[in-house]
Each structure stands twice: as C-alpha cells, then as structure tokens.
Amino acid sequence: MAGRSRDVTDEIRSRVGILEVVSAHVTLRRAGRNYKGLCPFHSEKTPSFTVNPERGFFYCFGCHAGGDVFDFVMRTGGVPFAEARRELAERAGIRLDEGAEPERRAGDRERLLRAVGEAAAFFRAQLAADAGRRGRDYLAGRGITPDTIERFGVGYAPPGWDHLLRALRARGFEPAALEQAGLATGRQGGDGYYDTFRDRIVFPIRDLQGRPVAFGGRALDDTAPKYLNSRETPLFVKGKTLYALDVARAPIRESGGAVVVEGYIDALMCHQFGIEGAVASLGTALTLDQVLLLKRFASRVTLVYDADAAGADAATRGIGVFNEAGREIGTAQDAFTMPVSLFGQAELPVRVAVLPPGVDPDSFLRTQGPERFRSVLAAALPIFEYRLEVAMRRHDARTVEGKVGIVDEMSQLINMMAHPVRQAECVRVLAERLGVREDAIRGELRRLGTRDHGRRPARPAAATPIPESSGRTAAEQLLVHLLVAEPGLRAPMRRAVTAEMFRDPGCRVLAAALLGPEAAEEDAGALRERLREETAISLLSRFLIAEPPVRGDMHKVAGGCVQKIRLCDLEERIAQLMDAHGEAVRAGDDARRDGLAAELLKARTEKERLRELKVSV
Ligand SMILES: [Zn+2]
C-alpha cells in the first residue's frame, strides 16, 4: 500500500510541470537554467523566488521557502499534503485509489489536530451556553465584541475536572490521546486524568491554515497563573508559533508590515480596532524561529511593548533575536565565496513603539482609540535609536561615568550587527549624541570584540575552495551542498563522515538523509519524501537550485570540507585544554597540569598531521 501511494506521488511529480503550476501564481522570467519571479510567500520588490523546472524544485532566496510541486500547492493553498496530491493528480489526469491514503506528512498529526479541533468547538459551545455566562461577562467587561470572539474562536472552559474529557470521550477520543494533545493532564500516581483548562477563557492558537493546535487560557479572577498555555505537543512548539498569524498573514503580506504585541487580548484588540497586521509573541521574548516565520510574510516589523521594565526587557531580548536573524545570514554570506544574491535580502527592518508606562496595547486602544495608536506605531524608533533612548534614560550623559555606561551598553549592540556599513553609521550617531570621538567608541568595540570570541566576524573569504578564514558552518554547508548536487559523492562520503559531525541543525538532518544507504541512487523528489523538518527541506531546495560555489574535483573539495570540520573541532579542543591548563597552573595543581599538557601535545600533533594530510575521498 505504502509503495503504491509513493509510486503515484512520483508519477504525479513527473507528469505535472512545476513551472506550469507556479506560473499560475507568479510571473516568471528565464534566468539561465532557472526561472525567477516575485515571491508569493513574502513581499519583495526584486525577484528572489527561483524555480528549477529540470529538478522540479523552487526556492526563495529572500524568505527561504522551498520545496517541490506538492510543497508549492500546500503553501499557496494552505492545504495539507493529501489535498495537494488530489489536486495535482486531477491535473495530471491520474486516478487516485481512494483507499490508498498517502502516509507522507500525515499520520498521528492528523489525529491530534482532530482532537484539538473538537476541543475548540467544545469550548466555543460552552461560552455560548448557560454555563458560559461568567466567560461572556468577562469578555464583555474587557470590551471584546461578539464579532471578535467569533473570528478568533474564543471559548470558555467550564469549572470542574472532566467536562472536556467526557465530551471528547463520547466522540471517540481516549484520555491518553487528549493528554498527548495537551488537553488533559495525568493525575499523580498515574491514576486517571483531568482537564488541563478549567474555568478559563480559552484562546485557540491556530496554525497558518487556521486549525487550532493549542490553547492559551486566561483566569477569570486572581487565580494563578493568570495565563496558562498548552504545554508543547507534536503540534505546538511555543517558540515557533505566533498567535493570530493565521488571520494577520494576508494583511501583513499586503501591507508588508507586521505588528508584534505580547498578549492574546492585545492582539485581539488590535484586530478589533483595525490594526490587522497584529500578532502576539505568546510570551515576553521573541525567538529566532518566530522571527524567521514573520520574515515569510513581513518586510518590516514594529514591536509594541509597554514602557515598564519587563516590557523594555522583552523588547530588548527580542531585538537580540532580530539581530541574530540578520547575522546568521550575513555571516554565511561572508564566509562563502558565493554571489550575494544567493542569500540576498536578509534584512527585516525592526522598529520599537513604546507605550506609556503601565499601558498595554489593549488599554491604550480602548482609552485613546486606534488613531492615536497608529501615531504611536508611526513614531516607532529603529532598534538602535530605541536602545540609545533607553540607555540615555538609565545613565546621565552629562557625566563621564554616564557616557562610559552608555557606550558600554551600545557597543555590545553594535558588535552584534551584521553589516559594517550600519555599524559605522551607528558609531557616528552615538559619537554625535554623546559628544565623544568616534575613535574612542571604535576602541571600545575592538576591546569587546577580542573578549567575545564567539562573535568574531569572519574575514572576507579568499578565492580558494575552502577558505582558511571561513568557519565550520561554511564547511558544513558546502559539504551538504556537494552531497545534494553530486549524488556520486554520497556512497564514498558515508565512509568519511557521520551526520553527528554536523552542528547546524538543518545540515545535520539533511546530511543524515543524504548519508543513508538508500540515498546513493535517490533523486531529489525521493529525498524530499524522507524529510519532515522545514529547515532541511528549505536547505535541500536551496542546494538544488544554486550551483555549488566551487569548481574542480568535487571529491577533493568534499575531502577538504571534512578536513576543515575536523580542524575546527581540534582547535576548539585545544582552546579548552589551554584554558583548563592555565587554571591548573594558577591553582598549583601539578598532576592535573601535567596531564593536560600531555593531552595538549597530543591534540597539537594531531592538528599538524591533519594540516599536512592531503585528504581525498
Ligand atoms: Zn520569499
């Protein structure tokens, strides 16, 4: 059965041209062996969306969306695999065996989704029923209209221990399954289950297709915790989800702008007042995954936080993440000898809008109205200026100590920036505001730069295949790129590397698939079938669309990558040993010192050997 469904999938793939399917959504122009157009998954002005008809894959160098023809239909239509397959089969004139459910990208997930969907319906019905009066009164008291309640599927979990358990059991869901979906909690001692959400307003957290995957529950009184989120499940990873993005994605794509607030009710109220690009971060700090998710739809982001300490701190941590997103891509670009366009459009401009102390978007909107809120959004400051304002408030810029404190704080931020031009501009602004020389600030940056080894910027890559200056990540990526592009390398490399050698999570998953015994003869479509993680699918698509950035004997280049990775590991080991050795010397621990010295010698000898080795696989 499984084999048959796979055959049909392959047949669809070979009969339906990806170019034809994509062309219905995107105007494509030929560029060499690829076709390019404006990305349908994020807003952009210069085309970074690329299709390779020969390989049957697409990839966007801006938002990193990628995949095969099924992925394209799933993404544009917001439909699950089974439906995309049905649609494409029809197009290809292939009759699907109704009994053969495709096992790919389905399974357990579907069952959990059904359970959470049923629970959402139950909570909605409870809010409308007599039992939901408390909930309705609460929502009315907060000024949330019936329209908004309906649109966001807000519900009510009644008090008591097993209302949901009993209701869903009647529909065939066992308690254990509900626990897996985060809806029930096992009693201590393993004796039965109880409802996770009790006497709370529940906000369904929905995926991009609008299907509930989890809930946020708010207490109606002073019960702690005030907010209770579903725990993480196979459907719901907190740091990878943004509340209300299912509703906000279309307006965000249209206007390009996203507004990030903290709470569920903040997000609801924004929508109620016509701020349609609003999403909530489901916690205080944004994660890198959430930023990358936003980047699929938004071309600029405004963070709205209250001006109180917690809010300012959250905004600050969020900013670290936006910087990281920029740096991740920026560094890769530096480290590779690749055309800039390959990584392209890495920027997601972020501004911070500050509300008066103690005021959140919800109360601001209700008391001041949407027009005032829009002016606050319009007055949002770029990250650097926002942080400078915060620092100027914290320190007295008229004193030397105050200046030192401000420069210290701001230098750390400047050091995190990916772009040298922006760094220079920020140094200039900071010097001007404080009335100090730019040199003094650059000196501070250098001091921090040498102390912070992890953040040393990569030197521009030399024109050799594996530049000495490029890091582990570059070597990892290039190696995986070669394994994708040159199937003949896969079998021999299986003897030289293991997936565990790769640190980058996407590279590791993709490498595991490429180094499997079945991979030697596999084409790209079959490889795609075996991948589940979006980062790995995106990476596969990118490596299928972009030529490897090197020429010559690919076996030699791949061997060089392995050598580079091993050398980096050894260098790290040597640095650790040296630190430990220094400590032992200071502590006067002679035995430990001698032991470490012997290990150091061994590691250094190994490094010399590796350096001289002409690796070929
Ligand atoms: Zn894109």
Image: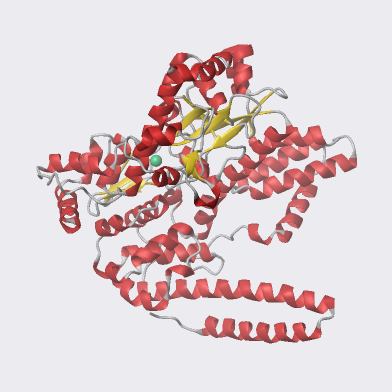
- The image quadrant where one finds the C terminus is bottom left
Going 46% across and 29% down the picture, which residue do you hit?
A: 256
Is residue 456 at least partly visible in the picture? no
Where is residue 58 shown, x and y percent of the image?
A: 31, 47
**Tally of numbered discs:** 0
Q: Is residue 111 left or right of residue 443?
A: left
Going 86% across and 40% down the picture, which residue do you hit?
A: 402
Is residue 191 at least partly visible in the picture? yes
Going 63% across and 21% down the picture, which residue do you hit?
A: 376
Using the image as rendered, state which of residue 583 and residue 471 is in the foreground: 583
Where is residue 81 shown, x and y percent of the image?
A: 27, 44
Q: Quadrant of ligand 1?
A: top left
Q: Is residue 163 left or right of residue 578?
A: left
Using the image as rendered, state which of residue 558 and residue 553 is in the foreground: 558
Q: Is residue 579 above or below residue 192?
A: below
Q: How is the image coloured?
A: secondary structure
Where is residue 486 shown, x and y percent of the image?
A: 31, 67
Where is residue 173 shown, x and y percent of the image?
A: 35, 40
- The image quadrant where one finds the N terminus is bottom left
Figure quadrant of residue 123: top left
Using the image as rendered, state which of residue 299 and residue 276 is in the foreground: 276
Q: Is residue 328 left or right of residue 123?
A: right
Going 29% across and 72% down the picture, which residue do you hit?
A: 488
Residue, far front: 191
Q: Is residue 372 above or below residue 540?
A: above
Q: Is residue 148 above or below residue 470?
A: above
Figure quadrant of residue 607: bottom right
Figure quadrant of residue 431: top right
